[in-house]
Image (tube, rainbow, N blue to C red):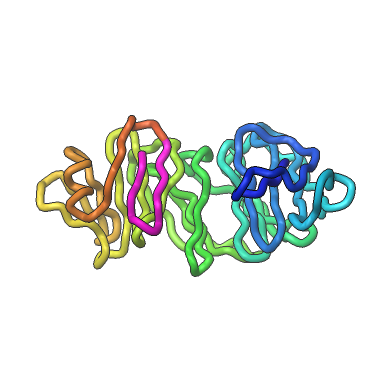
């Protein structure tokens, strides 16, 4: 694990660790990282200099299974989804496990979770998705299934959640904020889930979203300041 100054690229500190598949997570002055291919994770305080393995490692977590998606830190806890569809929650300060729960029939564990300002965590894809509440108690807030399972992580822009399925691109928002294309290719369920399929570039452009689209199985990212979504 390494820390760099973004303004000039100077390496600030480094720490012995593992990882090649998943990104690190940051919150409250702590970086958590693990291999992504299985093994132990570790939490490192970010205020050190040079080699900090012996001085700034706060805790080393238990050995976990393969976890291709990335972890996420929300508030005082770290959340980790593993490939056996189990989500684990550890206290950020000491690594104590708060819970370990199975998410039945979750479509993919490759997509990285995202969160909102209210602490809701979205384990979302274009297949079966879960929304859970952050905190030390496991609580499912919602389950939805778009029936178009794929692996890319979700992206957020302009109050909307964008998902890439194998067949369609989906824009998910509150009913009042959802894109409403005039053509017949839009599908809605319960007023919350909007599917934009054929002619996706033109339809998303009508809602003010700019798209770069290289392929249906590629990742997806968003610029929250401009509302641009890149796939």
Name which quarter of the figure residue 151 lies in.
top left
Task: Examine the rendering and report whether any part of residue 135 can be seen.
Answer: yes
Residue under the image location 47 percent in, 57 percent down: 131
Tell me which segment is drawn in magenta. Answer: 219-231
199 relative position to 211: left or right: left
Q: Position of residue 195 (x, y in %)?
A: 25, 48
Task: Examine the rendering and report whether any part of residue 95 can be seen.
Answer: no
Residue under the image location 79 percent in, 42 percent down: 15
Front residue (pair 17, 102) = 17
Residue under the image location 68 percent in, 35 percent down: 19
Q: Determine if the magenta segment contains residue 149.
A: no
Q: Residue furthest left?
A: 183
Front residue (pair 104, 118) = 118
Q: Position of residue 123 (x, y in %)?
A: 49, 50
Q: Position of residue 183 (x, y in %)?
A: 10, 48
99 relative position to 208: left or right: right
Residue under the image location 27 percent in, 47 percent down: 210
Q: Determine if the magenta segment contains residue 223.
A: yes
Front residue (pair 60, 62) = 60
Quadrant occupied by the C terminus: top left
154, above or below 191, in the image: above
Q: Position of residue 59 (x, y in %)?
A: 81, 52
């Amino acid at each position: 694990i390494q820390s760099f100054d973004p303004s000039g690229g100077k390496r600030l500190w480094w720490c012995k660790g593992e990882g090649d598949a998943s990104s690190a997570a940051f919150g409250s002055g702590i970086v958590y990282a693990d291999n992504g291919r299985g093994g132990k994770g570790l939490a490192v305080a970010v205020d050190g200099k040079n080699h900090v393995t012996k001085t700034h490692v706060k805790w080393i977590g238990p050995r976990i299974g393969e976890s291709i998606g990335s972890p996420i830190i929300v508030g005082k806890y770290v959340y980790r989804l593993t490939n056996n569809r189990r989500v684990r929650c550890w206290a950020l300060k000491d690594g104590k496990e708060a819970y370990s729960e199975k998410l039945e029939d979750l479509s993919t564990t490759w997509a990285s979770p995202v969160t909102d300002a209210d602490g809701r965590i979205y384990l979302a894809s274009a297949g079966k998705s879960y929304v859970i509440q952050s905190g030390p108690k496991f609580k499912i807030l919602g389950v939805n299934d778009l029936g178009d399972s794929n692996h890319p992580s979700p992206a957020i822009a302009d109050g909307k959640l964008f998902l890439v399925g194998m067949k369609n691109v989906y824009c998910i928002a509150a009913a009042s904020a959802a894109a409403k294309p005039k053509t017949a290719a839009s599908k809605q369920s319960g007023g919350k889930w909007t599917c934009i399929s054929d002619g996706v570039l033109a339809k998303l452009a009508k809602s003010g979203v700019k798209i770069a689209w290289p392929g249906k199985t590629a990742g997806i990212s968003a610029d929250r300041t401009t509302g641009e979504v890149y796939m």
